[in-house]
Image: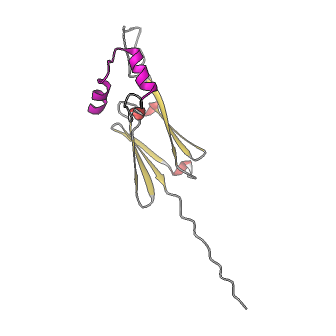
Amino acid sequence: MKNELSRRNAYNDFDFFDEAMHDFFPAFYGGKNHGHKYMRTDIKETDDAYVMEVEMPGLDKKDIGLELKDGYLNISVNKSEKEEGGKKDNYIHRERSYSCQRSYYVGDVKKEDIKAKYENGMLNVTIPKEAPKQENQHFIEIE
């Protein structure tokens, strides 16, 4: 979080054009890591599975969507701040409503075998490894 705040303060937060240019041309502005500020992911390997740890602070389970399609695990977020009651606040700038998506190639895995758990701002997804294919050797006797 500290790195994100210090990186954002490198330019004027109130200049819309300057911020838009940072978002469209991050490499030009020296922001190599600027593209994935949401859903930072660590993937570790165990003996029988891969475990993804996806950073998703400030979300509810209902904001997160998981979909397996054509060998890709798609993780999407749709977070929106709703106005409560009839009260309407006069915000000048809001950044707590957003949507984003990331896709990860997981191969030929069944949907039922993938396990996901969201706790304390971390989404943990366990994906079983594909069983190694056994080559059957058939020796042919030579006469």
- Residue 80 lies in the magenta stretch: no
Front one among 42 and 4: 4
Residue numbers of the magenta segment: 1-26
Tell me if residue 43 comes above or below residue 28 in the rendering: below
Q: Majority secondary structure of the magenta segment?
A: helix
The image shows residue 60 at horizontal and vertical percentages of 40, 31
The image shows residue 125 at horizontal and vertical percentages of 44, 46
- Color scheme of the displayed model: secondary structure
The image shows residue 40 at horizontal and vertical percentages of 39, 39
Front one among 21 and 89: 21
Quarter of the figure with the N terminus? top left
Q: Residue drawn 40% across and 58% down?
A: 46
Q: Is residue 85 visible?
A: yes
Q: Residue drawn 65% across and 82% down?
A: 139
Quarter of the figure with the C terminus? bottom right
Q: Is residue 78 visible?
A: no
- Residue 6 lies in the magenta stretch: yes
Of all residues, the one furthest to the bottom in this rendering is 143
